[in-house]
Every structure is written in C-alpha cells, then in structure tokens.
Amino acid sequence: MNARPVNARTVAVKVLERVTDGGAFASAALDAELGRARLDPRDAGLATAIVYGTLRVLPELDRLIAARLHRPDSKLDPVLSAALRAGCYQLAYMERVPAHAVVDECVSVVRAARGPKLAAVANAVLRKLAVELAGQAGTRPGLVLPAWLDAQLERALTPERRAAWLRANDEPPGLCLRVGAGLDRAAFAQELRAARPEAEIELGVLAPRALLLRRAGDPRTLPGYTEGRFTVQEEGAQLIAASLGAQPGERVADLCAGHGGKSAWLAEAVGASGQVLAVDVDERKLDKLGLELRRLELDDGRVQTRTIDLSVGSGGLGAELDRVLVDAPCSGLGTLRRRPELALRVAPEDPARLAALQLAILKNAARLVRPGGLLVLAVCSPLAVEGPELARQLERAVPELVPCHELGAPLTGFQPDSDGVTRVGPWHGRGGPVSPDLYQLVGWRKPR
C-alpha cells in the first residue's frame, strides 16, 4: 500500500489481506501491524475487534457482499476484498460505528493501494450495504462455521457446552500470562494495574498462576518481563502442563513441545533435581526454547532438547520417563477465538488425517513411559475423531495401557466425561473470568 495516515481501519484491512490472501495467522499479522502502526490502545482495540470479528463471520460477509456486486462470481482484488469485508463487518455487526466513517476510510484504503477504479467499486458496494443494513448491527448471528464443522461440533459437544463455546468465540481474545512460581499473583496484578491503568487485569480462576489481561499492550513492555517474572501462556495450556502432575526429582517429557511453554512449566515442577526432555520435529522451535529458559532463569541444564520425528520412531529413547505429555499436532479448532481463520482453512478430511498422525506419535510416546509411569494426551480440538475415537484406537494398538482419570492438580476438580475424556473449555466459569481454549485430555498408566 502507498503511504497514508494509519488508523485502526487501515491496519485491519492490511491484516485481513495478509490473512485471507497471504495465508498469515491473524494473531501474528495483527501483532506485527500494530507494532508498526503504534496506535493508541483504543484504536488498537478497534483494529483487533474488526479483524477477529470479520474472520469469525466471513462466510456471511461474503454472502452479503456478493449480493451487491455486478459479477458476484468474479475473483476480487485482495485489497478490495479485504476492505469490503472489513467495512461490511462494521456495518452489519458493530453498533455505534458511524457508517460514513466506515465507508470513507475503507474506500480511501482501496484508492491509496489500487487507484480510483477499484475505489469506485468499494464505494458503490459499501454505500449500498450502509443503507440496507442500517439498524441491523447487533442483531445478526455470531460465529459462522462451515456446515461440516457445525455438524461435527453438534456430535462432539453437549448443547450447553457448544453454546458456551460459541459465545466465548464472539469475544476478541485477551492476553493470558503465567506468573512465576512462588510469585504473589494478586500483588503482581496490582503492580501491572499501576503500570497500565487503562488495562483490564483479572486473576484467572482455572489455572492458579493465570492473569487475564485486555488492553495491556505488548507483553514485552510490561514490568517484570525482562526479569522473567512471567511468561505468555494461554490458560488452557497452563492446565495441560499441570495435568501431568510432575513432581520434584522426576524425569518427564514434553513431546511435540513447540516453543516450549509447557516445558518451562515442567522444569519448575521437577526442580533442579529433575529432568525435562523437550522433543519436537522442528529444531528451530526448540532453539527459541533456550532463549526463554534463560529469561526465566531455568537454563541450569534441567531441560534437554531432542529433534525427533515421533511419527516414525522414538529416536533411540527407552522406557525411562516417569511422565510423558503429548500435546499432539491437531486441527487446532479449539483455538478459534484466537485463530478464527482456522475455520476457513481446515478441510473436512483434515481431522481424520491428523488423527492418524496423532496415533503414530502416541504409539511411540508410549514406548518412553517406564512401568508405573503416566502418559497424557492433549489436543486443542473439540472433535471426536481427535479425542475419544483416537483414545480407543490407541488402547487397541497398545493394550497394556490402563486408562487413568486422575490428572494432576488443578485438574483434580475436573471430572472426565462418560467416554473417559476430560474436556476443558470456557464453560468452566466457576463464577469468575476464564479464557481457556477448548482442550481434550486423556491419561493412561503403564502397569508395573
């Protein structure tokens, strides 16, 4: 795009173009654009609301836009498409947003990037929408899912849980921190409030070390970041790390470790006398783990890393681990609030394909658990094929595994469902603020 004044709507259009045309993830693209734009917190919040809101209801927006195009089946220019979607979302869903400002600013973005001809198209479509949608903002449905996914959710979740999860996805995601072990969480929250009076800061009620923040800005600029007093970790991910129940002095593994947020939690749990093995197929992710461990002052050798493709083998490792966590690569559909673009990218055949990968990884992971040890599977997906159906497949493939429903604190208060799967989601309110993605967890013991 050509240089022009940057505001919330220009940022939103740029991010939407990168996500829908360039394949970027919304969270990363938005963080990058907001970092460049340096908007004030109010405008950054508006840009965030437009981006996530647009992606949550994209099929409905495209239907509204196509009905007002001369050639609805033609492929639109990426900038024009992003501007129309952003504008349509504001007109159809956002109350108290001046229609003239929406139209003028979205048209200006197109004019600056693509010239007057496409700007005229944007102007004509958005002005029609402004007239025809007047008074309808706030009355339209929230998250719009592909039909196949909606059907899978109805099969996988109770009506109450499905409704709670869909409601949670109507809200833009906040930021979740995990405070350091031994840190007074309430006192640290007060310190953050003093530094960021415009931010909303609450204690999480599910994970005992979670702080939930909104409008707090870049977490790297918060007090205590440099000193390693906290790390960014989603509340459900904190619960998964806790579910392993790691104890001081134990040898545990974080398989499919990614950037190692759970590995750092486990390193605190096992202490200096314990050992954590962080395994991932991507060596670059494990390299970043080292940097984070140094910031958190956990780089004393208790965490070892290995690059292993667990779908094809165990890398020569034996059955020597007390506890093994497999946060398996999955469809990620339980993270739609933070990554709404996944609903548009995951194909109907993908969950079954990923479940086959998960099963291969689990069979090799089971080989690493010592007799009497614990294996825990976690997936950030609500689908049955990646939850109870996968668990039954593993039990048939590795019959010596015994289902274990007693997961580590704070999950001791969570009861598994009748299929043996413990499900964590936004329905676990307990009268306070919650932010977790939707996870399924299953545990097994290996007999002595």
Image (cartoon, rainbow, N blue to C red):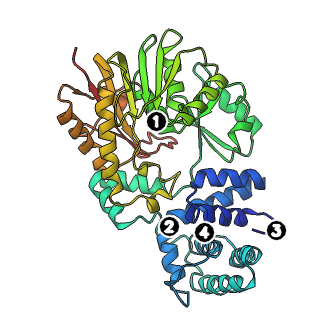
Q: Disc 3 marks which amino acid? A: Arg
Q: Which residue is mark 1?
A: 281
The local secondary structure at tag 3 comes to loop
Question: As displayed, is residue 268 above or below residue 80?
Answer: above
Nearest to the eye among marks 2 and 1: give it. Answer: 1
Give the side of residue 265 with respect to residue 370, left or right. right
Sequence order check, earlier mark of 4 and 3: 3
Q: Disc 4 marks which amino acid? A: Met
Mark 2 crowdedness (10 Å alpha carbons): few <14, some 14-19, many ≥20: many
Query: Do the numbered discs 4 and 1 sit on residues whose CB atoms are within 8 Å?
Result: no
Instruction: Give how far apart the Cα atoms at labels 3 and 1 are.
Output: 43 Å
Instruction: Give how far apart the Cα atoms at labels 3 and 2 are.
Output: 28 Å
Sequence order check, earlier mark of 3 and 1: 3
Q: Which residue is mark 2?
A: 57
Query: Do the numbered discs 2 and 1 sit on residues whose CB atoms are within 8 Å?
Result: no
Give the side of residue 271 with respect to residue 315, left or right. right
Q: Disc 2 marks which amino acid? A: Val
Q: Position of residue 11 (x, y in %)?
A: 70, 62
Mark 4 crowdedness (10 Å alpha carbons): few <14, some 14-19, many ≥20: some
The local secondary structure at tag 1 comes to loop
Nearest to the eye among marks 3 and 2: give it. Answer: 3
Sequence order check, earlier mark of 2 and 1: 2
Mark 3 crowdedness (10 Å alpha carbons): few <14, some 14-19, many ≥20: few
- Specify the quadrant that holds the C terminus: top left
Q: Which mark is residue 93?
A: none
Instruction: Give how far apart the Cα atoms at labels 2 and 1 are.
Output: 34 Å
**Residue shown at 56%/54% (left/top)?**
25
Sequence order check, earlier mark of 4 and 1: 4
Q: Which residue is mark 3?
A: 4
Give the side of residue 11 with respect to residue 142, left or right. right
Q: Which mark is residue 94?
A: 4
Q: Residue furthest bottom?
A: 70
